[in-house]
Amino acid sequence: MADRSERGPGPRASFGAVGKPLRRVDGRAKVTGETRFADDLSMPGMLFMKLARASVPHARILEVDASRALAAEGVRAVLTGKEFPVPFGILPVSQDEHALCTDKVRFVGDPVAAVVAADELAAEEAARLVAVRYEPLPTIASPEEALATPEPRIHDHGDAGNVHKAVALDFGDVPGALASAEHVFEDHFFYQGSNHLALEQHATLAYLDPDGRVVIASSTQVPHYLHRAAARVLGLPPAGIRIIAQPQGGGFGGKTDLFGHEIVAAKAALITGRPVKISLTREEVFYCHRGRHPVRMRMRTGVGKDGRILGHSVETLLDGGAYGSYGVASTFYTGALETVTYRMERYRFRGCRTFTNKPPCGPKRGHGTPQPRFGLEVHLDKICERLGRDPAEWRIENAVEAGSLTANWMKVRTIGLKECLEAVVAASGWKQRFRRLGRGRGLGIASSAYMCGAGLPIYFNDMPHSGVQLLLDRGGGVTVSCGAAEVGQGSDNVLAVIVAEVLGLHPADVRVVTGDTALGPVDLGSYSSRVTLMMGNAAVEAATRARERLAAAAAARLEVPAERIGFGEGRVFDVSDPDRGLSFAEAVQRAEAAGGTVGTVGSYRPPPPPSRYKGGGVGPSPAYSYSAAVVEVEVDEATGVVRVAKVWIAHDIGRALNPVLVRGQVEGSVYMGLGEALMEEQEFRRLPPRLSRALVHQAPSMLEYKSPGTLDMPEVETILVEGPEPNGPFGAKEVGQGPLLPIPPAVANAVYDAVRVRVDEVPITPEKVLAALDSASRRYGPGEFPSVPWPEPLLVPPPWEGGDGGALNEPKRKDRPARRPEAVKP
Amino acid sequence: MERAVAAPVPREKLRLALSVNGEAREVLTESWKTLLEVLREDLGLTGTKHGCELGECGACAVLLDGELVLSCLVAAVECQGRSVTTVEGLRDGPELHPLQAAFADHGAAQCGYCTPGMLVAARWLLDRKPDATRAEIAEALSGQLCRCTGYLQIFEAVEAAGRVMRGLPAPGPRLPEVHRGSSHGRSE
């Protein structure tokens, strides 16, 4: 049983659950091994599926000969691209994937055929017998090659040649601002790609329920989007398909995309009439990828005499890999949150994503924002040094104010950035220690911001982003259901805590049903740090409606006005005389007698964003979380090895719903940020021409793909800054992604403090540190930014230069009504 | 990925008798299987996880005759007559083992996927050294990858469990320091 010792004596009307360090509601199952991850499922008569994947990086498929595979012992079915003529993709603008390749393969690992057999070994052996004849096509390894090689195109969609998406946005006259600025600074950065490396490999079990309907139980963070895609590709009505997002063994964005194998398994179940399971190997997970985009960046900033940013310009070049994935959004995200931390008067963004013949990149924790955040925070460190300013003080002085509308029309409501900075400055002894630790030891600082959910859904619609349904039974039991996916982050616990808080129960009294499209209302999915805020608000609404019904019934019984009814300790009582009350179960019974079965729903849709220009849908959020970190490093000048000694991190959480779980998200983010800062690399190499110049992963195993272990992890001092966010449930903001963002730049800045060299790219490996130490420039990093054919920029005046959030040179958009932006409140 | 077509794996069956979590079990299984596969697929003990099946991540750790092993690297045929302890065998009855309770209460299990292996490795350590230091815990768990927690709450949970196993009171989870925001603009 869960520990109930947290319940203090006497009834309380509020905060019995919120903010308490209680065991999470799914904690017991996780420590007993009873949590059912997708690969833990099995069914009688279950068949196994394996995929035959492309061995060449770019080729036309001339023929797929499955005859030998089909004839092999134990094989029940072989599926090829012919079965899947309908394309899919996570974004409506890039429906460019087929569940199995139809006419072309675009990277080594692209799935070509699926073999379904009596056991996994038979499927694997037969998959090797699928013979594919290819006509090889030239291959593209990098964005630079993609820009130089418009033909042949990897896809026939996208902006031009092998440019998937190029965007240009001008928020005021930045060249003018730079020309008039006291100082102008320019820097170039590179942020390497990395894999999510969730410990659980993707798995799917598809079957027909006893009524003949399709069920897909999968390791997916986005059951609703999978539901839509599976219906389209399979040609079935959505109502005939049920998606179950099993609890996941880590996601980090890696299960936020749709994967062909999820749909192929369903098709195989329809063909064979048997349950079909697929479980990817670790090597396959590396090749499915959808992880961090490698990004090259150029930043230019004009600074006034007083240190204010007069104009800031960012150019980004993303290596997208072979498919669209979330790429259009990823591209905009490399620019969208640049403005929400420090005041800048004018802002200019250029972003370009190219296709390459490598596994597709997509969203990983921070989605498109850690790369420019790294650039910006290191850039500012250099600027402060040149201006002779303390980088912590500069940040505090220039932090965006609460209630601001930024240059690119992002609405910042609450902001705890200054408090976060002040907290890590004080805790780390920054003022006494920065630039004074002596050779080989250094401190670095950085701060950051992240969204609490995307302001717009992935596909245009007017419906809620999250829905919650509540059912109360006569025994006092409460069941809450929602389509949200539990990735490990604790979203089931968020749901239980919020419902418990409103109804005066213990979270362990609340039964949670999530991730099942047949049993709960839609939630758009576990991405963009949206679940706590959006699902949470829907839960508050559903629970408040139930509370009102119970309060009315209790008020009638106690003969007091409903406003005097309080909830707490599993009781419903008169707040003026707390001993007078009824048990929660009795209140349910009375409410049921008075008005029928007690079931309520709640839903949430974010406020409309003030940005109205094309692309302005990426970046707006009901709230932004803020983080600041100080990192202390030791750098060995003989070996180039960087050891992280300690991390101080403060996070603006709004309100912590559970401080133990919040701390876990902060420290897990720090950990992942350190991995990206120092070692993680999703890197590819070319095989020789006789092997088709294939682009293969240099280390598709957990041993060779370096990630931090127990001995690499430094001490972390975590500080939470609480100041309730009006848009968050009980004031809560996100914590799953934001705290990763300041870590890589803080490490880079600390390395500079230690040995006075700049490594302007991550990971900061010993080789790069040594190269920087040996170079005349005392720097390691990318050179000139490639020439990109930018489109005509959209001209969007910042709020203080007039305008309405739309572009001056863009035709009025039909899908958004003209509207005055929300007034800026002090 | 297309590889040279290997010769099919021989399909002889193996009759395997072993003790699992204190119970005698006998299975007829494929001779090429690993202990991990026998546990998960033949015995239905899916608590033991896999993250790589190459001995790299530690998710499949179990005790074999009391020694910590990676079950993905142990051939089932090697386990004849031997004794295996998995996460399912950590507790006897409904009560959680002190390590399990501490992991649940200290935030040491986030997604829970590395947790079974982590628990078994920690149990191996605490059985030998219930007062293990932070450095000894980090060393003992250095073969276990966790992508969620950053390890610190895991270390704290192992320390807390060690205290309970030594008859000392269970410490509560370590909480982050909380600062009140002052310049948050609009308040509630």
Image: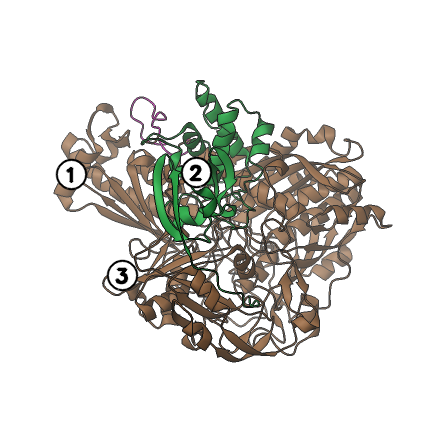
Q: Which residues are magenta?
A: A3-20
What's under tag 3, amino acid-wise? Asp
Query: Could you tell me residue A358's position as x and y percent?
Result: 60, 65
Look at mark 1 in the image and give the residue it sits on.
A589
Judged by depth in the image, the label closer to the viewer, 1 or 3, is 3
Query: Could you tell me residue A472's position as x and y percent?
Result: 22, 43
Q: Earlier in the sequence, mark 1 or mark 3?
A: 3
Establish if A373 lies above or below A49: above
Q: Is residue B47 visible?
A: yes
Q: Are marks 1 and 3 in contact (CB under 8 Å)?
A: no
Give the colour chain B carries in the figure. green
Q: Which mark is residue A36?
A: none
Pick whichever, A164 or B135, lies toward us. B135
Distance between mark 3 and mark 2 Cα atoms? 40 Å
Pick whichever, A812 or A785, lies toward us. A785
The reply to whether the magenta stretch includes residue A8 is yes
Side of A496 where B135 appears, left or right: right
Distance between mark 1 and mark 3 Cα atoms? 35 Å
User: Same subunit under labels 3 and 2?
Assistant: no
Query: Residue at 80% of width from left, 49% of height from top?
Result: A771
Judged by depth in the image, the label closer to the viewer, 1 or 2, is 2
Q: Secondary structure at mark 3?
A: loop
Q: Residues within 10 Å of mark 3 (few under 14, many from 20)?
A: few
Give the colour chain A carries in the figure. brown
What's under tag 1, amino acid-wise? Gln
User: Same subunit under labels 1 and 3?
Assistant: yes
Q: Quadrant of the N terminus of chain A?
A: top left
